[in-house]
Image (cartoon, grey):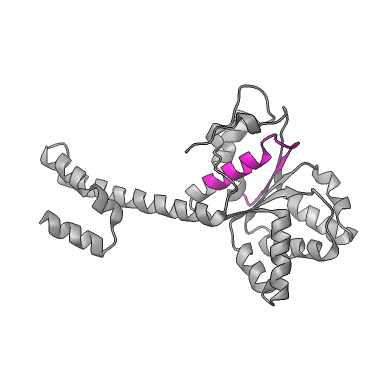
Amino acid sequence: MLQQTKILAQKLKLNGLLENIDRRCAEFESGNLTAHELISLLLSDEELSRNNKRCHRLESRAQFRRKADLEDWDFSYDRGISKGKMKELMHLSFLHNRENLIFLGKTGEGKTHLAIGVGRRACQNGSKTTFTSVNFLLEEAIATKATGKYLTWVKTIAKQEIIIFDDFAVRQYNHEEANIFLDLLEERQRKSANIITSQVHPDGWYKLFEDPVIGEAIVDRLKNPSQIITLKGGSYRGMIVVKK
């Protein structure tokens, strides 16, 4: 009977249940579980397996630069973010409120670490996320224009619940690049959330764009509404612990 159940579970692609059925049945036969508890645990095993696979799939598609978790953040001295704010980030309140999240700080102070950590937490929560450097994003967008697929590209990437724009404002942006930004932000306004890492305070973003009108529209959509977290304390890179 157990072998028939395994065959049926395999046909139905109940891999989580299949992986745990021998252990759960042994617990039941030893008297540690009731029949109801056995069924409940097997279903929970299947749910956990599916959630883990979904999370892995979302993280793979997000294309994070590296692994980083919010739990690894070093609180041994003040780096500009409190434990209370970190807990808030873990709960993804900015996403629920459709706010943008802006991490400011000098090179190596942990902006990208926090952005990836939040992104990975979002994937674990089932949210579609994309990580990209701003320069790569613009190159990709311009390439799609050359093939006539730009509008499709904008619609597709705009569907992500979170886009992480890494290294924003490291240079000035021309008219075409500014319009790409604006197209994306218009499509996503108040429907999703963006995470921006930058060494430049938002007040300094206006001068990065050739057209001041477009620049003002972009900055307004990034800042309103948003949470701004300014990091400090010097380079964080040598202190990051990466889970394997």
Kindly give the residue lying farthest to the top in the view shown: 76
Tell me what residue is drawn at x 24 percent, y 47 percent: 20
Report the front residue among 66 and 175. Answer: 66
Q: Nearer the viewer, residue 215 or 113?
A: 113
Q: Relative to 104, is 100 above or below?
A: below
In percent of width and height, residue 55 lies at 46, 51
Locate the N terminus by quadrant.
bottom left
| Residue at point 57%, 47% (across, down) | 119
Q: Is residue 154 above or below residue 44?
A: below
Region rendered in magenta: 97-121
Q: In which image quadrant can residue 67 be found? A: top right
Residue 117 colored in magenta in the image: yes
The x, y position of residue 111, in whole percent, is 68, 39
Residue 23 rendering spot, x and y as whole percentages: 20, 43
Give x and y (percent) for residue 22: 18, 47
Q: Is residue 4 magenta?
A: no
The one of 219 and 225 positioned closer to us in this rendering = 219
Specify the farthest residue to the bottom. Answer: 148
- Which residue is at a point 47% across and 56% down the rendered structure image? 57
Q: Nearer the viewer, residue 193 or 75?
A: 75
